[in-house]
Amino acid sequence: MSLVCRVIPCLDVAAGRVVKGVNFENLRDMGDPVELAALYYAQGADELTFLDVTATVDDRATTYEVVRRTAEEVFIPLTVGGGVRTADDVARLLAVGADKVGVNSAAIARPDLVGEIADRFGSQVLVLSLDVKRARHTDTRRTRSGFVVTTHGGRTATSLDALDWAREAIDRGAGELLVNSIDADGTKDGFDLELVGLMRELSSVPVIASGGAGAVEDFAPALRAGADAVLAASVFHSGQLTIGDVKRALVADGIEVR
């Protein structure tokens, strides 16, 4: 775990609107991404993550204009993912205001993409986004860890072991791991601490824990399990929690925040 943790709100965007569901299904409208980005910046967010959750499914690029408008409202690091297929896509996102770019499905389909991005822009720009779910009992013999990665916004399971893929991506140049538990996503039952711990053991780069935050008490355990940053969406979009609420709870728990 880093000496100082980061608290990161996530904007899951579809058709230019922030959406949220449970286990990546039954998405409902949560508001305008630009307005929410400005709100979270004012609340003290350390970074923002913007994920176009239907770009890969719809076989299109991320909505660049929404990214540009979002970047104009915040002055903290902005990570953008969704529909990134080439190094040129990364160049376009950086040009409209992204600081880091997340890749998932395209990197699984063509792992060389990781190295191409890292070589051209530096590892610090590249976030490997891992949408992870526990393997079905019948699949566990094919996955050493019992966790598999999924593609297309969590809709398509692969037989690729999540830990093996994370390790390979780091070797190829990934500078950060965004580890989202599909099983916990939107449930508000807490982060998957086992998954966070396993990723921390193998990772030489920062780990962001995502999926399952439901109360201020959920964040400290994820950080103690080894995350360098904690990411959440539903609890912030609904107004159930603010960034300040989370940071105050972490400080009370003895964890240093920015």
Image (cartoon, rainbow, N blue to C red):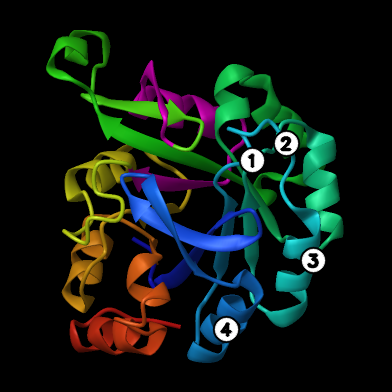
Task: Inspect the image, locate mark 3, and give the three-letter code of the amino acid beneath it.
Answer: Arg
Which span is picked out in magenta? Answer: 154-181
| Of labels 2 and 4, the one closer to you | 2
Circle 2 — which element?
A: loop
Circle 1 — which element?
A: loop
Return the x and y of residue 108 as percentages of the image width and height. 55, 23
Circle 4 — which element?
A: helix
Disc 2: which residue: 60
Give the left or right position of residue 112, taking residue 178 as reference: right
Give the left or right position of residue 145, taking residue 163 as reference: left
Return the x and y of residue 157 as percentages of the image width and height. 38, 22
Disc 4: which residue: 41
The answer to which of marks 3 and 2 sits earlier in the sequence is: 2
Disc 3: which residue: 68
Disc 1: which residue: 55
Locate residue 106: give its quadrant.
Answer: top right
The answer to which of marks 1 and 4 sits earlier in the sequence is: 4
Cα gap from disc 1 to disc 4, whole angstroms = 25 Å
Q: What residue is drawn where x is 72% and y is 36%? A: 60
- Disc 1 and disc 3 in contact, CB within 8 angstroms: no
